[in-house]
Amino acid sequence: MMVNEDTLARLLSMGVLVQPGTDRPLSQSDWNALMATPEGVAMLFRSEGPAYRDAVGSDWDAPLSLEGLSSAALTHLAHYTTQCDQPQAQIRTEIDALLERYLPGTVDLVVELGCSAGPDMPTLSKRASVVLGIDSHLVPLRWLARRVAGEAPQVVRRLGGRRFATHNFQDPAGDLSNVIPLLSNALDPPLVAESADVVVAINLLDSVREPLNLFLEIDRILKPGGVLLLASPFHWNDQITPLEQQLQTLYPELDGPEATCFILDGGDPRLPHLSFDVVDEREVPWILWDHERCSMRYLVWMAVAVKRPAP
Ligand SMILES: C[S@@+](CC[C@H](N)C(=O)[O-])C[C@H]1O[C@@H](n2cnc3c(N)ncnc32)[C@H](O)[C@@H]1O
């Protein structure tokens, strides 16, 4: 599998990954037995591995050939590219600045949920012994795995209409050898309780089926005193998040940032044990290019919250 052996040994020695269906730590031989895709991305689900594999279907093993894809599929991929390959974008530099301020040293374990191809991995990898990058989508994780291996994967950019160009992913920081990409579910991460020093979830909250469960899991895996870096444009999509689960339905009188702060402070009666101090918040533009003549601009609320130690 395409991970750095030293990094993997460090991660396994932390005893933070769990065997599927249990709370027992994963050993090296368990890891060797994990299902991996042909390009070497490990897959570890706490409870639902085979069901997930069935859902992925027959495309699972297909190596990605850009030439063979329809323009609809290429457009879809082109959107991923623009999210991931803009190291100078303001959203990326703000994340770096926030971590510089609230995480000046190096921690043992950073977990990024919904990491995609890892636009923030150069920033995160500087600040941790190990960074675990979790996503449920194989295509961007394959790109991340190749970046970790020191390659610059070829990605696609839409020029307009049915015109596409390929280019190689640029990495400003180079060494991502302490990053481990993992195909898994952010709503059920395969980690023991209180294992992460830092949890990062950038533009994930409004991309999951059950946002409240995301808060529950972030709280579960974060150590007391640990740091959460969360960002969201609160751009809900009924086809991804059922209306009754969206924060704007649960809290019609609050906007997205207010509802999030309320939940993090233990205000939601379903999650009364949550206990975070929001220590920084800011609004940051997040711009995705569709093609040369079209961009989409979101305004993302970005916050740093610290999990209060147990009373
Ligand atoms: C809008 S993208 C954001 C990607 C990246 N963090 C960024 O800032 O550009 C959301 C990502 O979350 C992933 N995702 C959505 N639901 C997920 C889940 N339940 N578990 C893990 N990843 C998930 C998607 O595959 C996608 O890569």
Image: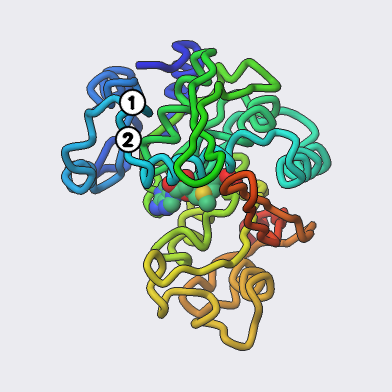
Can see residue 80?
Answer: yes
Instruction: Measure how far apart labels 1 and 2 are at the Cα level.
Output: 7 Å
Name which residue lies at 81% across and 41% down. 97
Image-based side of 15 in relation to 129, left or right: left
Foreground residue among 122 and 224 = 122
Quarter the C terminus occupies: bottom right
- SS under mark 1: loop
Quarter the N terminus occupies: top left
| Rendered location of residue 8, percent (x, y) | 45, 19
- Specify the farthest residue to the bottom: 253
| Rendered location of residue 96, percent (x, y) | 76, 38
Image-based side of 304 in relation to 38, left or right: right
Foreground residue among 23 and 117 = 117
The three-letter amino acid code for the residue at tag 2 is Leu
Foreground residue among 36 and 132 = 36
In the image, is residue 141 above or below residue 227? above
Which residue is under mark 1? Answer: 65
- SS under mark 2: loop
The verdict on label 2 being within 8 Å of ligand 1 is: no
Question: In the image, which disc is placed on residue 69?
Answer: 2
| Rendered location of residue 259, percent (x, y) | 62, 75
The three-letter amino acid code for the residue at tag 1 is Ser
Foreground residue among 213 and 91 = 91
Name which residue lies at 57% across and 48% down. 290
CB under 8 Å between discs 1 and 2: yes
